[in-house]
Amino acid sequence: MLKYETVIPPHVTDGAPLVVLMHGRGADRFDLMGLAPALAPDAVVVCPEAPWPGMPWGYGPGWAWYRFLGRNVPDPESFDGSQAQLAEFLAEIPAALPVRTGPLVLGGFSQGGVMSMAYALRNPGAVPLVMNFSGFLAQHPSVRVTPEAVAGTRFFWGHGTMDPQIPFDLAIEGRALLRGAGADLTERDYRIGHGISPDEARDARAWLAEAVAAPGG
């Protein structure tokens, strides 16, 4: 199973949401742990580590979910490998936790956001809630944006309008595809670069609380 860290508030009980947060390229499983109290204070937060070393691809000493080929294109082999390992991780992690978790929330920053949206679209109905922070919609044969693929999933997509790494144009393009398929999509824009601002964390927290409280959440 992928290496991971957990943030489990002492007050959480059975039925608490399981929030899986995936880091961006060149980072590690510790990178988003500090976001957990602001984003999901009443959830079990699990932060897995990507399986590929980033150094051979020029991403520094951390880890990566896939080799980036440009624009919104991941390398198919490394991308498929990570998606397969993510599927195994999601199947195994509930049994490793001290509480019986409730709804699954899959999210991440940059490459982690790309992985989250792609996994939900590749596995229709498996992920009720997705949080994408500054990721793109992957151009890959298995990532199909159709009414069937988006049914039953709610999406939060936050993006910086001045993002130099994953340009805002990719957010406009990807969101349009999701909306065109009928996705339940919440869009939030921020005058920031490639990062997660406090305002974005607050917006995502409010979205998550409302989504979990909604019927079927």
Image (cartoon, grey):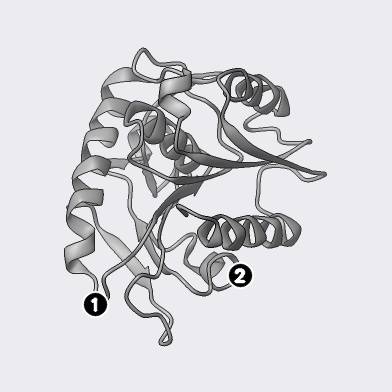
Residue displayed at 47% across by 60% down: 31
| Residue 59 visible in the snapshot | no
Residue type at tag 1: Pro
Residue displayed at 61% across by 18% down: 180
| Residue 42, x across and y down, in percent | 49, 74
Q: CA distance from mark 1 to mark 2?
A: 22 Å
Question: Quick check: marks 1 and 2 in contact, CB under 8 Å?
Answer: no
Q: Quadrant of residue 16?
A: bottom left
In the picture, measured across the screen, residue 118 lies left or right of residue 211, that is left
Residue displayed at 25% across by 50% down: 90
In the picture, measured across the screen, residue 115 lies left or right of residue 212, that is left
Q: Between residues 13 and 174, which one lies in front from this camera angle?
A: 13
Q: Which residue is mark 2?
A: 38
Q: Between residues 92 and 56, which one lies in front from this camera angle?
A: 92
Say which element carries label 1: loop
Neighbours of disc 1 within 10 Å: few (<14), some (14-19), many (20+): few
